[in-house]
Amino acid sequence: MRTWEKNVRTVVPYTPGEQPKFVDVIKLNTNENPYPPSPKVKECLEKMNTEAFRLYPEPACDTLVDALAETYHMDRDEIFVGVGSDDVLAMCFLTFFNSGKPVFFPDITYSFYDVWADVFRIPYECQPLDKDFRIVKEDYYRENGGVVFPNPNAPTGILMELSEIEDIIRHNQDVVVIIDEAYVDFGGKSALELVHKYDNVLVVQTFSKSRSMAGMRIGYAFGSKVLIKYLNDVKYSFNSYTMNRPALELGKAALADPAYFEECCGKIITTRERVKKELSGLGFSFGDSMANFLFVTHERISARELFEALKIKKIFVRYFNKPRIDNYLRITIGTDEEMDQLLAFLKKYIQEN
């Protein structure tokens, strides 16, 4: 090892879902929305003043923050905006988890949590889900340095009731509790109402899933004015201009079309519930997902085998080679046509094998 390498901050990085370069694929591996953004987004993009790109964007992201405040009936000082929910969550880890005590999150959850903890040198403990992949709320009653979990959880899709979330918060009022709601719009109930009840709660959401804008990288957090001020202080300490001009304007345009938002979420929910029934008939089992994906295992054929067979046919799903879940596939809900092709392949493959 070279001398300077002894001072490098080494980490095991997060591995993002595969982004295939070729065409004619059925992409069900990264939980993107199969439907395009609102027509208002396209209209806004076509009218965008590109000459303004020579200027820095708003450091406080006023355009988008004000639109979010109006949409969610929040004070603008209770909203933080970042480059996707990953950026927002990472900022939360850096800002709030500094006690030296371990942060708690589930053992089966979003794979970025332990990566952020490692890169920021934050101690953590993974609390095991039960046999049905549900969070055990009592595991979070012990002393800790903070709590974070998705609801619905990822990659399981299992939803936690709001009363159980509040119970965890009540037992953790001396640390910050973060609820990661990337998938809440597909059948869950947001914990947003708890932000005004507890000043240590942050609710993080994204435009990537339900608003079909993963490519624009827009995430946001709701919290007490004190929490949001601390987040902004850290943000301004290393990058004053986190959000670019197109993202701010296009995010605002997406929020201006609630009817389209509800329509797209409704279509995905309807498709998901249909596919649950059909997969069950093919010998798959899974939890009752309230997300835009299903986390499935087959009674006879291994997940890895199915993953490889699907990939050959250019059908991409997600496989996690990790303890407890290495015989599961996470399947994003696509259009009805995409899901029909997936189901047809699985039916044929299972019959022949």
Image (cartoon, helix red, strand yellow):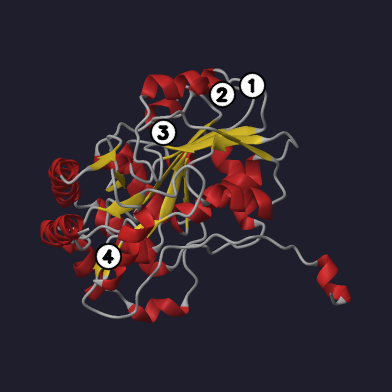
Q: Which residue is mark 1?
A: 142
Picture quarter with the C terminus = bottom left
Q: Nearer the viewer, residue 294 or 99?
A: 294
Callout 2–callout 1 Cβ contact below 8 Å: yes
Density class for disc 2 (Cα within 10 Å; few <14, some 14-19, many ≥20) is some
State which mark lies toward you, 4 or 2. 4
Position of residue 89 relative to residue 84, above or below, is: above
Residue at 17% over, 62% down: 345
Q: Kindly tell me whether residue 127 is visible in this rendering.
A: yes
Density class for disc 3 (Cα within 10 Å; few <14, some 14-19, many ≥20) is many
State which mark lies toward you, 3 or 1. 3
State which mark lies toward you, 2 or 3. 3
Q: Which residue is mark 4?
A: 310
First reached walking from the N terminus: tag 4 or tag 1? 1
Residue at 31% over, 56% down: 252
In the drawing, what numbered circle is on residue 139? 2
